Image: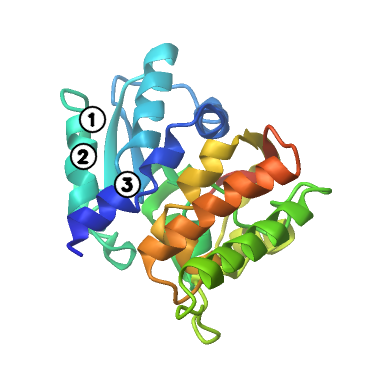
Amino acid sequence: MATTQILDTYSYEPFTQHAFYREVNQGLVRQALAHLPAQATDQPLCIVDLACGTGAISELVLQELACLGRSAHLIGIDSSAEALERAALRLAGTAVTFVQSNLSDLTPIIDHADLIFFCNAIHLIPQKETLLTRLAQALRPGGLLACNTTFFDGAYVPGTESYYRLCVRRALEYLRREHPNVRPSRQERAQAMDWLTADAYRHLLVAAGFQPRVFGVHQGHLPVQAWRDIGSYSGFIEGALPGIPLPLGAQALRAAADQVFSEMNLSFIPRSWLQIVAAR
């Protein structure tokens, strides 16, 4: 399947359209902007949206800046050319520059930034301390890093653990019933499944030269459609059902979400995001 088709069919984008997702990330954006000092000159702020994808966070940043009456030049960085094309269309006519780059090649792009957003992605990075050190170097003294994740040890709200176990069980039952020759891999394991505790993230930040300013948890309420959407995302499929082809994994996880919500008589599942704002 072509890269663009994968982006279309197994994209993270539908998950970002839910109200809880906007609320969680808008909360982080507002907290980060509130910690920026007042501008002493007419020089616009330099703000970076790292791993910006199709521009959901960039859009929130621009909206909040407008509400505050602050000016900034926003740089959106992502490794996917297709996602950046969509981001550029989404935010056409705004003060945003989009750059295609890997996380290892940031030095020529970011220099003395006032604020870097790195939302919903840090759990995917194997060498987190190396990246955090690189980001500290890209910030001006006193500059801020704002990041969050819902893939950390603490994301499951107490009492909801049975949902996750049952959902995976129902997805595996679906595969055995509908596709008996398909089996998940015992060898493959997605990086997103290696979750750190909040304390571990705090230690990594301090080791990289940051001082946490905001360090807390925001709870979102995810309806069944959100679980269907995240169950259709390639990264989630690879973590929940490693080795299963994306089309079959998506079918199984969507069917499992419907079945478990019905079995447990649920209207939503609460889930926690770790929200961090740290200063260099």
Label 2, on which residue?
86
Helix, strand or loop at label 2? It is helix
Find residue 90 and name its label.
1
Contact? badges 2 and 3 (CB < 8 Å): no
Is residue 140 toward the left or the right of residue 73 in the image? right
* Residue 133 seen anywhere in this rendered image of the structure: no
Q: Could you tell me the amino acid type at mark 3?
A: Gly
Mark 1 lies on a secondary structure that is helix
Say which quarter of the image contains residue 17: top left
**Amino acid on which the number 1 mark rests in the picture:** Arg
Kindly identify the amino acid type of the residue bearing the numbered disc 2. Arg
Q: Position of residue 83 (x, y in %)?
A: 24, 47
Tell me the distance, in whole angstroms, between the alpha carbons under discs 2 and 3: 8 Å
* Image-based side of 200 in relation to 59, left or right: right
Which residue, given by chain and number where applicable, does mark 3 sit on?
Answer: 53
Looking at the image, which residue sits at the far bottom? 187
Quadrant location of residue 277?
Answer: top right
- Which residue shows up at 19% across the image and 50% down it? 82
| Image quadrant where one finds the N terminus | bottom left
Quarter residue 251 falls in: bottom left
Front residue of 123 and 227: 227
Crowd around label 2: few <14 · some 14–19 · many ≥20 (10 Å)? some
